[in-house]
Amino acid sequence: MTTAAESSDATTSSYLEAAQALAPLIGAHAESIESERRLPEPVIRALTEAGVFRLFAPRALGGAEADPVTVCRVVEELAKADGATGWCAMVGATFSLLGGLLPEQAAREIYVDPSVAVAGSFRPSGTARAVDGGYQVSGR
């Protein structure tokens, strides 16, 4: 029988190994990441397939429901290859926490596609107002 600690260690190990395996791909794109100021599609796809953007998301939504130390270690590994990639991984992983905080139906609508990554700001500067059919948003 596997204990919770052993299961957690296995999860940590698998995500760390995935992050380490991405280093050559990230390194190969580091120059374009710097010059274009964005992650190229192959890097985003690899991060998505590795489950990086859903590290904190609940398992019921296809996430890892990982502990904070695991997430920090994964982000650290990615940042070793490229700082901007580590930053983007941290943002995506952190905001996947929202999946467990949203009403269940809303969370299922957002997380139905495994390629969905959620991002945001802890200090938004803008407004949203209800309009017919949704919201009108302005700000940065």
Image (spheres, rainbow, N blue to C red):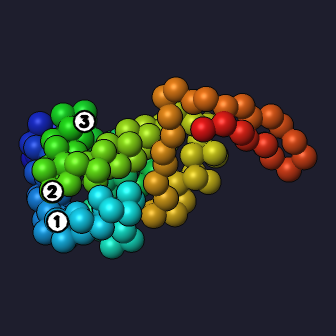
Is 94 rendered above or below residue 29? above
Taking the view exactly as shown, the residue that stands out farthest to the right is: 132
Say which residue appears at 51% left-offset and 40% top-offset.
120
Taking the view exactly as shown, the residue that stands out farthest to the top is: 123
Q: Is residue 118 left or right of residue 10?
A: right
- The residue lying toward the viewer, choosing from 106 and 69, is 69
Question: In terms of secondary structure, where does tag 3 sit?
Answer: loop
Query: Local crowd at mark 3 within 10 Å, few (<14), some, or many (≥20)?
Result: few
The type of residue carrying mark 2 is: Ala
| Figure label count | 3
Say which residue appears at 72% left-offset and 31% top-offset.
127
Question: Looking at the image, is mark 3 or mark 1 nearer the viewer?
Answer: 1
Q: Which quarter of the image is occupied by the C terminus?
A: top right
Q: CA distance from mark 1 to mark 2?
A: 6 Å
Q: Which residue is mark 1?
A: 27
Q: Which residue is mark 3?
A: 67
- The residue lying toward the viewer, choosing from 107 and 127, is 127
Q: Which quadrant holds residue 30?
A: bottom left
Q: Which residue is mark 2?
A: 81
Mark 1 and mark 2 residues within 8 Å of each other at the beta carbon: yes
Q: Is residue 34 left or right of residue 109?
A: left
Residue 2 in sight from this viewpoint: yes
The type of residue carrying mark 1 is: Gly
Question: In terms of secondary structure, where does tag 2 sit?
Answer: helix
